Image: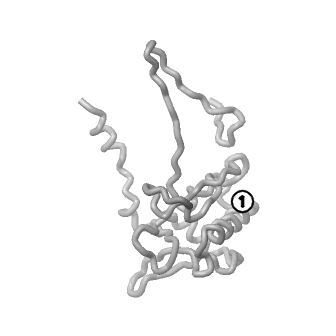
């Protein structure tokens, strides 16, 4: 017996089947392996409403003959530094305005840069951009972390606890 059927039942999120999510690519036209996130409609609306973003860093594009949209970095943002600076400017402005306060507001902001790769399963020497970890969720960027629970040879279980000084600490 294994837990595989339980994992299969719980692992039921299929983002590619959700037509309301807008693909977020590194560039237009998108090439294979450049999908870095999926945007919820509310985030797309915030991007569309944000007319002050850095020299048109993000482009909202509708493929010919399609009513769907995609978002990507413009031709002026072709380096990791340019993409990182552009998104940082946008999320800092949203944070100051209280936009998405439940995601990037107050203590949720970690001051932790997270490396975003063109393909999250293949590590390249350099990330495609870096972004505040808490803001990654807004852009549908998958983030990873480590959590260890240890069972020792003398039949003890070590379960770590989150630090009370960590930004995302929630009192039990």
**Vertical relation: 115 (above or below) 75:** above
Of the pair 108 and 83, the residue shown nearer to us: 83
Across and down, in percent, residue 62 comes to 47, 82
Q: Residue at x 46, y 80 (%)?
A: 29
Across and down, in percent, residue 19 comes to 40, 67
Is residue 36 visible to us here?
yes
Of the pair 20 and 3, the residue shown nearer to us: 3
Is residue 46 visible to us here?
no
Q: Residue at x 48, y 25 (%)?
A: 150
Of the pair 104 and 119, the residue shown nearer to us: 119
Identify the image quadrant of the N terminus.
Answer: top left
Across and down, in percent, residue 168 comes to 65, 41
Quick one: which residue is furthest to the top in this view?
Answer: 154
Q: Residue at x 60, y 54 (%)?
A: 114
Q: Is residue 162 left or right of residue 71?
A: right
Of the pair 90 and 26, the residue shown nearer to us: 26
Circle 1: is it few (<14), some (14-19), or many (20+) Cα within 10 Å?
Answer: some
Identify the image quadrant of the C terminus.
Answer: top right
Task: Give the structural element (helix, strand or loop) at label 1.
Answer: helix
Q: Quadrant of residue 121?
A: bottom left
Quick one: which residue is furthest to the bottom in this view?
Answer: 64
Q: Is residue 91 left or right of residue 10?
A: right
Q: Quadrant of residue 131?
A: bottom right
Q: Is residue 71 left or right of residue 17?
A: right
Q: Residue at x 67, y 48 (%)?
A: 108
Colour basis: one colour
Quick one: which residue is furthest to the right in this view?
Answer: 96
Q: Which residue is mark 1?
A: 95
Across and down, in percent, residue 32 comes to 40, 71
């Amino acid at each position: 017996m294994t837990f595989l059927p339980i994992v299969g039942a719980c692992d039921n999120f299929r983002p590619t089947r959700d037509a309301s999510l807008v693909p977020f690519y590194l560039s237009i036209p998108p090439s294979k392996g450049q999908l870095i996130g999926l945007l919820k409609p509310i985030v797309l609306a915030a991007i569309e409403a944000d007319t002050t973003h850095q020299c048109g860093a993000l482009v909202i594009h509708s493929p010919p003959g399609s009513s769907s949209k995609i978002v990507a970095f413009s031709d002026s943002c072709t380096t990791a530094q340019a993409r990182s600076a552009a998104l940082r400017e946008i999320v800092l402005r949203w944070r100051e305005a209280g936009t998405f306060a439940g995601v990037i507001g107050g203590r949720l902001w970690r001051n932790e840069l997270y490396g975003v790769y063109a393909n999250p399963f293949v590590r390249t020497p350099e990330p495609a951009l870096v972004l505040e970890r808490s803001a990654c969720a807004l852009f549908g960027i998958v983030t990873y972390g480590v959590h260890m629970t240890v069972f020792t040879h003398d039949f003890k279980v070590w379960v770590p606890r989150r630090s009370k000084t960590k930004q995302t600490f929630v009192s039990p």
